[in-house]
Each structure stands twice: as structure tokens, then as C-alpha cells.
Amino acid sequence: MLILGIETSCDETGVALFDSEKGLLADDLHSQVDMHRLYGGVVPELASRDHIRRIIPLIDDIIKRAGVSRKDIDAVAVTEGPGLAGALLVGTSVAYAVGAALGIPVIGIHHMEGHLLSCLLSGHPPKFPFVALLVSGGHTQLLYVKAPRDYELLGETLDDAAGEAFDKTAQILGEAYPGGPIISKFAEKGTPGKIVLPRPLLNSGNLDFSFSGLKTAVVNVYHKAPKPITEQIKYDLARAFVLVHKTEKALKQTGAKALVVAGGVSANSQLREALTKMCKKRNCEIYFPPSRLCTDNGAMIAAAAAFHLDHLKDFMAPAGFSIKPRWQLTEDVKS
Ligand code: KG4
Ligand code: ZN
């Protein structure tokens, strides 16, 4: 079955053609990062307008590259939420227009389910059940994934997402948006343990996270440091970001023998290194999406849709369509 995947929930226009038997045939992406960098973060109205400009040429391009014709497409998968309302509306409008024109079903996908299942696009996909650490610019969650569409929320952030903490830290250090890749690079040169940032909720007894205090802690370290700020302080500060403890606890609690780490922040090399070490110690397998598919993309949305094909008739010829800017993965996806 040939699935066209569309992702426009934030600042990336992502499209892909995924064959449920052959795998990923073609994908393409336009990142708006350069446009939003001028403003230090995503400007929703500009994001929507840019998605409108990019989406159709991107779809035409992957159809050509995959060597298929429009009529070969069997279903459209689109990010229905969560995300920016205007940006989601662009992707869903195009998806439902394509669905109506071709008479094919349109499958609304939860953005985080896309991230979660993006690891299945690697050459070495995990087997169910597993624990998943989802770390992106908008979400930080620990899930117990028993089977596709059977997700149990173990813990989540009570305030900022991990990616947001990276972005805000970079901003305080005077670096450009988005902060994750810069902090990741800085941390490679940092000394582990040189600067210790507070880890709220570390001993809370549950699996929730909190990152908003990190911002204040970074500001304090920054202001107390001798001026001018040395590059080494930036590196040491970046090195102080860790997320491992609660993930290990989730593995212990569930008894799972595999961990999946996904979402934009899963591109972070220190995080990968620390979690890999922890999993080795616990005799656990660890899985990441292919590096280029860690941040938002259309391939993960199409691949996630492949797990909904058994109830395809639910997605046929809808009278209208909706978006879900706020949407809990564990509540609605199971149906
Ligand atoms: O998953 P994603 O592309 O979008 C959302 O769903 O939010 O994640 C974007 C986030 C941003 O906060 C960005 O700073 C962060 O992922 N990020 C990273 C790295 N690359 C992107 N964070 C840490 N290290 C990286 N290498
Ligand atoms: Zn994302």
C-alpha cells in the first residue's frame, strides 16, 4: 500500500512516499529555521504562509523521484495534531483535498506517534514491547509501548519540553535558534561534572520531568561567571544537561528490555552516549531513528500510518476534517 505522508505541525514542511511492503520510496523537507532565526523562535503566521508556498512543489517532487503517479497513491497520512493551528490546517487541507480528488482515505496521525514509530525506519527496528523516551521541542514523555497503538504514559514534563530548555539555554548564551544542535556541539568540548545544574523532581518517586527551573539556573551560572564569558563556560554548561535517570527508572519499573529514543533532541550526541551506556549496563537494547529523521519529517507520519491500515474504513470519505492542536497521545490514538 502506497502512503503519502504530510507533516506541517510546526516549522518543517515534510512529505514522503512510504510503501507498507517496500519501505520509504522518497521523502523531502523544507526547513523554515533560517526564516524564524531572525525572530529567535517560530512565528506561527509566517510558518503557515511558508507551508502553503512549499507543500505542493514538494509533493510533486517526491512523486517524480519515486517514479510513481498520483493514481498509485492508496492513502494520505497527515499530522492532525498537536501543533500550531494554522500550520496544521495547511497540511490537513492539502491532505483532504488529495484524498477527495483521488477518492482515497486520509489518516490523521498524532505527531508524537510519528516520532515514536520513526525508529521503525532504521535498518534495525525494535520489537515490541519497549519503553520510549520522546524528546522534542514541544514534548518530553516516557511511554510504555506494548504494541502499535497501545501506549501507556509513564511520565511527562510538567512545564517546558527538553528541546525548549535547549533552545532557551542557547538564547541566554547569545546563540541562534534552534539551540539544540549548538548546545550539543558545545557539550562535546565541555567537562562532565564541571557545572552541575539542578535536577528538579529527580527524587519525586514518579517519572515526571521539569525543565523550567533549568532556565533560571543557567541564567544564574551565566551572571555569576567572570566576564567576558569564556567559551569553556558555555561548553561546561551545555555538558550539564542530562535526562538519563528517569529513563532508567522507567525500564526498571516496566521490566522492558528495549528503549527507543526519538524526537528532535534524540539527535543529541551526549544524550545518545549516556543512554547507550545506561542500557549496556542494564543489558537492554537501545534504538534511535536514523539521524536525519530525528527532527520533524513526513516519513515518520507515513510510516506511523502503516499501523492504522487495519481500520482504514474509519478514514474513508469524511464529511469534513478537523485538527487537534492539543492532543494526548495515550488518550485518543488507541481507537
Ligand atoms: O521533534 P522536533 O523537530 O520538533 C518538535 O516536535 O518540537 O524537535 C525540535 C527540537 C528543538 O528544540 C531543537 O533545539 C531540538 O529539537 N534539537 C536538538 C538537537 N537537534 C534538534 N536538541 C539537542 N541536540 C540536538 N542535536
Ligand atoms: Zn516533532
Image: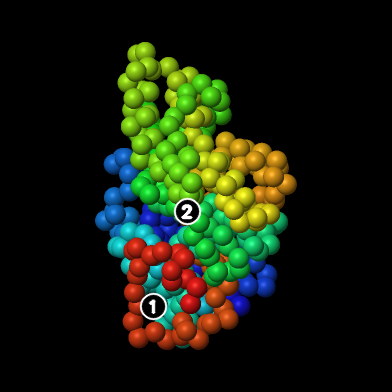
Residue 32 appears anywhere in the view: no
Quadrant housing the N terminus: bottom right
The quarter of the displayed image where residue 92 is located: bottom left
135 and 55: which is toward the camera: 135
Q: Position of residue 94 (x, y in %)?
A: 39, 72
The label number, if any, that marks residue 97 in the structure image: 1
Q: Secondary structure at mark 2?
A: strand
Q: Position of residue 204 (x, y in %)?
A: 45, 44
Left or right of residue 37: residue 263 = right
Residue type of the residue flagged with mark 1: Ala
Q: Nearer the viewer, mark 1 or mark 2?
A: 2
Residue type of the residue flagged with mark 2: Gly
Q: Which residue is mark 2?
A: 155
Residue 208 appears anywhere in the view: yes
218 and 2: which is toward the camera: 218
82 and 248: which is toward the camera: 248
Q: Position of residue 193 (x, y in %)?
A: 53, 24
Q: Within 8 Å of ligand 1, the CB of disc 2?
A: no
Q: Secondary structure at mark 1?
A: helix
Residue 199 vertical placement versus 304 (above, below): above
Measure the alpha-carbon separation of dots 1 and 2. Answer: 37 Å
**Measuring 34% from the left and 63% from the top, which residue is drawn there?**
326
Residue 314 vertical placement versus 241 (above, below): below
Q: Within 8 Å of ligand 2, the CB of disc 1?
A: no
**Measuring 36% from the left and 23% from the top, which residue is drawn there?**
222
